[in-house]
Amino acid sequence: MPITGADILCEALVREGVTDLFGYPGGAILPVYDAMLKFPLRHILVRHEQGATHMADGYARATGRVGVAIATSGPGATNMVTGIATAMMDSSPIVCITGQVGSRLIGSDAFQETDIIGITLPITKHNFLVTRPEDVVPVVREAFQLARSGRPGPVLIDITKDAQQLSCEPRWEQTVQVRHQRPLPAPDPQQCSRALDLIASASRPVVLAGQGIMLGDAVREFRAFVDASGIPVGVTLLGIGALPASHPRNLGMMGMHGEAWVNTAIQESDLLIAMGMRFDDRVTGNLKTYAPHARKIHIDIDPAEIGKNVPVDVGIAGDLAEVLRSWMPMLVPPRVSEWIARIDELKGDSAVRDIQQLTDDGHLYAAHVIHDLWRLTNGAAVVATDVGQHQMWEAQYYHHERPRTLITSGGLGTMGFGVPAAIGAKVARPDAEVWAIVGDGGFQMTMAELATIVQEGIDIKIAIINNGYLGMVRQWQEFFYGGRYAATPLVSPDFTKIAGAYGLSARTITARAQVADAVGEARRTPGTVLLDFQVEQEDSVYPMVPAGADLHAMIRRPSPLAETGADV
Ligand SMILES: Cc1ncc(C[n+]2csc(CCOP(=O)(O)OP(=O)(O)O)c2C)c(N)n1
């Protein structure tokens, strides 16, 4: 029986295991919306297509399953661009479906026509233009396969209106050649044995753990390697959760706002073993002075990453779980006791504010809020953040024990990500306690999604770290632009009234003494609750490696004595 391209698309999604999609309708995608009603697909109606892409992304990051976003042509499609680029930079598997004008109108500047294939070419793993219903089955299958395989990433399917309306007999059984997939490289045994030699003879080794450990389902193998080798681990922002924060070998986060001892350990190290990370400039600082004494081993599934930023002694392109499994029988653990003692000594030099010493002086610090939130949720919540100071404080003070529990935009640093990503995570994991920790700036970029929350009955908790500024930019102005606050003071609405207008509960918190009660009440209250934490306005994130500076040249928190002008 011939059926329409729209029906075929919906059935193909169901056959891929899709149960939820995030989207916004319009003329060029209406046949698919009409067909959707017949299929077991939950559609979450967003308020802006950017929100749909971040939701699909949050869904994917929380579970590893492919997230799906859908929109119409023209402005619907272009509104997706930021979310697609965000997913691309962080290797998140999403499939975005956009309607396109009729195939005979393409190139005629038809109403709501835009070349979304051209626009998204550099920010997708691959994209497809579908102009015939016959192509829907193979394209959907290939799109999902591409999104989730190898180094995951976003794939876009642009489908013309006539391809949705015309009918054909779907050939479900046809074998689909995944034409655009690069074959997975097999780990080179010679490189593996060189790596094992370097490991056995290292005296100051550090593992650099990235998100690839989770994306590659290598968490168990990674843990086994760390336990067997005893090598200390620094994590990237997206690598948080790859090893429990409480694991004795987990040193914490590296990089621009990483712990001083992690960055110093990297600079003193004689062997870096990078796994599923990409030596982003935010973790290396000045490449010329980066880890000058260290040999470098780099394992990544994407061969293009190896040697891209940092020259390496051993490069292994391949599946991390497979590499680590092959290493285990031959692994000779290095002698690290002196090195661990040296790192313990470095730990005395914390540049992240010691929370115990941060007494309640009547001010509310973001560090307090996030530390308390961590304790009160037993470190078990899924947290989606926005971008800025609160994001770094989250990484410093919320200690994640499990993989896929921190959902944050690292590579693109996309403000507006937090709330929609939290919604996507909650749809994917209805059992989980999900918090969005956002700034007053980023929240206002996508707060229209509060209506999505209400309409779809989503239960998340939103913590706004409200400092009255575009905080991270203000901090840069304080440090590097003579304290001239150009366009960073931020007037905001009364967020509790905004929440109230949507029928959501909300509360303002201005003192530390109120934090536990407010968080407890929010957790007990069914449905979404918004907490507006009005924190110290001109606090800064420490330590900070200025962009492009040497990794060890960290700006430290001024001591109270220095603040008073006393000689220190
Ligand atoms: C879409 C977008 N625009 C601009 C920026 C640049 N930027 C990075 S952090 C930041 C300030 C964020 O302010 P806020 O959301 O209040 O969070 P805070 O830093 O105060 O925690 C800005 C403007 C960005 N990352 N993303």
Image: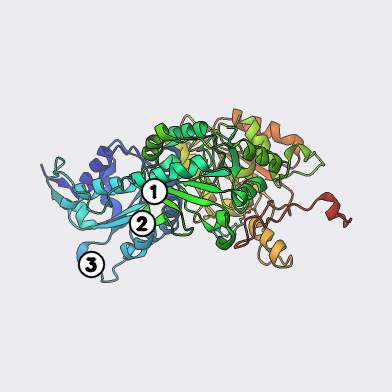
Quarter where residue 415 is shown: bottom right
Asked if residue 216 lies left or right of residue 265, the reply is left
Q: Is residue 500 visible?
A: no
SS at mark 2 in the image: loop
Residue 316, numbered label: 1
- The label nearer to you, 3 versus 2, is 2
| Label 1–label 2 contact, CB within 8 A | no
Q: Residue furthest right?
A: 566
- Image quadrant of ligand 1? bottom right
- The label nearer to you, 1 versus 2, is 1
Question: Is 358 located above or below residue 162 in the figure?
Answer: above
* Residue 280 at x, y percent in the picture: 51, 56
Q: Residue furthest left?
A: 1
How many residues crowd mark 1 within 10 Å: few (<14), some (14–19), many (20+)?
Answer: many
SS at mark 3 in the image: helix
Read off the residue under disc 3. Answer: 105
Residue at 27% x, 39% y is 16
As measured in the structure, the alpha-carbon distance from the residue carrying label 1 to the one carrying label 2 is 25 Å
Question: Is 451 located above or below residue 313 in the figure?
Answer: above
| Label 3–label 2 contact, CB within 8 A | no
Q: What amino acid is found at the position of numbered circle 2 in the picture?
A: Thr
| Count of marks, rendered view | 3
| Sequence order check, earlier mark of 3 and 1 | 3
How many residues crowd mark 2 within 10 Å: few (<14), some (14–19), many (20+)?
Answer: many
* Residue 538 at x, y percent in the picture: 74, 54
Residue at 15% x, 51% y is 134
Residue 124, numbered label: 2
Residue at 54% x, 58% y is 281
Q: What amino acid is found at the position of numbered circle 3 in the picture?
A: Leu
